[in-house]
Amino acid sequence: MQKEFSISEAEKSLSSIIHDVEAGHRIRLTRQGRPVAVLIPVHKYERKKTGFWKELVLLRQTIEDEGIDISDSDFEGLRDLSPGGRLTNSDEISA
């Protein structure tokens, strides 16, 4: 289970919170009861950050090596062109 602290609680317990993060726990920080940030261990952050770029480079290399030709027509009909709903400050993005 993910631990949660208000920012004022986190200020008072920062050392303990950092130990929990180093142990692999995710910590959610809130302001006035609303989530504003998540603390994660550095190794998890680095893996997420570099994983995307590594996979993108691999995909591009595969396309080049195999001579795959991708054109705009390959994407026709894939995108939903209908207007979507507007996001508001109350919409929460799940992690």
Image (spheres, rainbow, N blue to C red):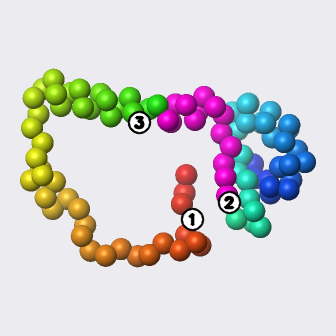
Label pair 1/2, CB-CB below 8 angstroms: yes
What residue is shown at x 83% (from left), y 49% (from top)?
10
Picture coordinates of residue 90 (x, y %)? 59, 73
What crowding class fits label 1: few (fewer than 14 Cα within 10 Å), some (14-19), or many (20 or more)? few
Does 80 sit above or below residue 20? below
Measure how far apart labels 1 and 2 are at the Cα level. Answer: 9 Å
Residue at the spot of label 3: 52
Mark toward the start of the polypeptide (1 vs 2): 2
| Sequence-wise first label, 3 or 1 | 3
Q: Residue 23 lies in what quarter of the image?
A: top right
Q: Give SS at disc 1.
A: loop
Quick check: is 48 in the magenta stretch? yes
Indicate the quadrant where residue 43 lies.
top right
Residue under label 2: 35
Q: Position of residue 58 (x, y in %)?
A: 29, 27
Q: CA distance from mark 3 to mark 2?
A: 25 Å
Per the rendering, the mark at residue 92 is 1
Amino acid found under the numbered disc labelled 1: Glu
> Is 91 displayed left or right of 36 in the figure?
left
Residue 95 horizontal side relative to residue 78, left or right:
right
> Residue 6 shows which numbered tag?
none
Dot 2: what SS?
strand
Region rendered in magenta: 35-49
Q: Around disc 3, counting alpha carbons within 10 Å, would you say few (fewer than 14), some (14 to 19), or many (20 or more)?
A: few
Identify the secondary structure beneath mark 3.
helix
Q: Earlier in the sequence, mark 3 or mark 2?
A: 2
Q: Residue at x 54, y 57 (%)?
A: 94
Q: Position of residue 54 (x, y in %)?
A: 38, 29
* Type of amino acid at the residue the image marks with label 3: Phe
Mark 3–mark 1 distance (CA, rounded to whole Å): 23 Å
Q: Amino acid at mark 2?
A: Pro
